[in-house]
Image: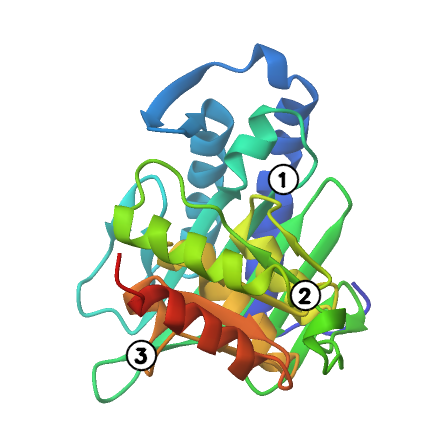
Amino acid sequence: MALRLSPHMTVMANAAQKASKRLLRDFAEVEQLQVSIKGPSDFVSQADIRAEETLKEELNKARPGYAFLMEESGASGSENWAWRWVVDPLDGTTNFLHGMPHWAISIGLERRLPDGTSEVVAGLVYNPVVDEMFWAEKGVGAFVNERRLRVSARREMSEAVFATGIPFGAVSAKHRYAFAVTLSALMPQVAGIRRFGAAALDLAWVAAGRFDGYWELGIKPWDMSAGLLLVREAGGYATDAVDADPRETGNVVAANTHLHARLREAVVEGMHKPV
């Protein structure tokens, strides 16, 4: 990258690039990977585990006092952390294991605030297959490689393409029902709805204006932390379905400024419609 990155972003980019080298080799040999079952419809490969180990080693080497929240190994470091890495080493694992080139490394950096809450101040989502590194820093803007990002300017639902995540077996029946209601309400109104299977990339694509919006219920902080900042720094809204922190609730509604309210209204109606 020709752009001058901050020290934090340089650390994140270097760690992602190092982890991606082995992931790309494993992706080329995906049929030979050793895979273990992690849960219903959710598989984790040795590639995932090795990537997390590499990311943790590189990030810890550069910032030894920072805590971690990682998909595979969970939370580590001081409970009274001032800074914390939030890492998904392989977002889109099922795509990866099926040879689909739509997966990414996601790294978010949280800073503890005086009131005990935290904010995401830097985020990176890297798809090494196409060498697209989406990154953002609070107050600096959002970028893909060297190009600044802006959310789309579409105003009409009939022209909008939204992304979502279809709930799988481990997701609660309540969330599955809410998704079905929301999907049924939105489909007649929009140009299309896509399910590509990588939440971090869905959010990055909203920031890039490729999607006009995205919603999903019941996902984890490592799926969204970097992506939330990308959307916000690209001029969009990334919120919970109600007035809460999506990192706490697991429910995300992200869109450009013109369509966010209407997308969120549909999601809220789906969540509250009686069975």
Looking at the rendered structure, the secondary structure element under dot 1 is helix
Query: Could you tell me if the residues under marks 1 and 3 are in contact, i.e. CB atoms within 8 Å?
Result: no
Residue 209 in which image quadrant: bottom right
- Residue 139 spot, x, y in % from top left: 58, 87
Residue 12 screen position, x and y as percent: 56, 59
Distance between the alpha carbons at the discs numbered 3 and 2: 27 Å
Residue 176 placed where, x, y %? 36, 49
Q: What element carries label 2?
A: loop
Measured Cα–Cα span from mark 1 to mark 3: 34 Å
Residue 218 visible in image = no
- Residue position for label 3: 244
In the picture as drawn, the residue positioned furthest to the top comes out as 32
- Going by the numbered disc 2, the residue's amino acid type is Val
Residue 189 visible to an observer of this rendering = yes
The residue carrying mark 1 is: 20
Mark 3: which secondary structure?
loop
**Residue, x 39% and y 65% (percent of image)?**
270
Q: Label 2: how many residues lie within 10 Å, few (<14), some (14-19) or many (20+)?
A: some
Label 3: few (<14), some or many (≥20) within 10 Å? few
Residue type beneath disc 1:
Ser
Q: Answer yes or no: do the residues labelled 3 and 2 have beta carbons within 8 Å?
A: no
Of mark 1 and mark 3, the one earlier in the sequence is 1
Query: Which mark, residue 151?
Result: none
Quarter that holds the C terminus: bottom left
| Marks 1, 2: nearer the viewer | 2
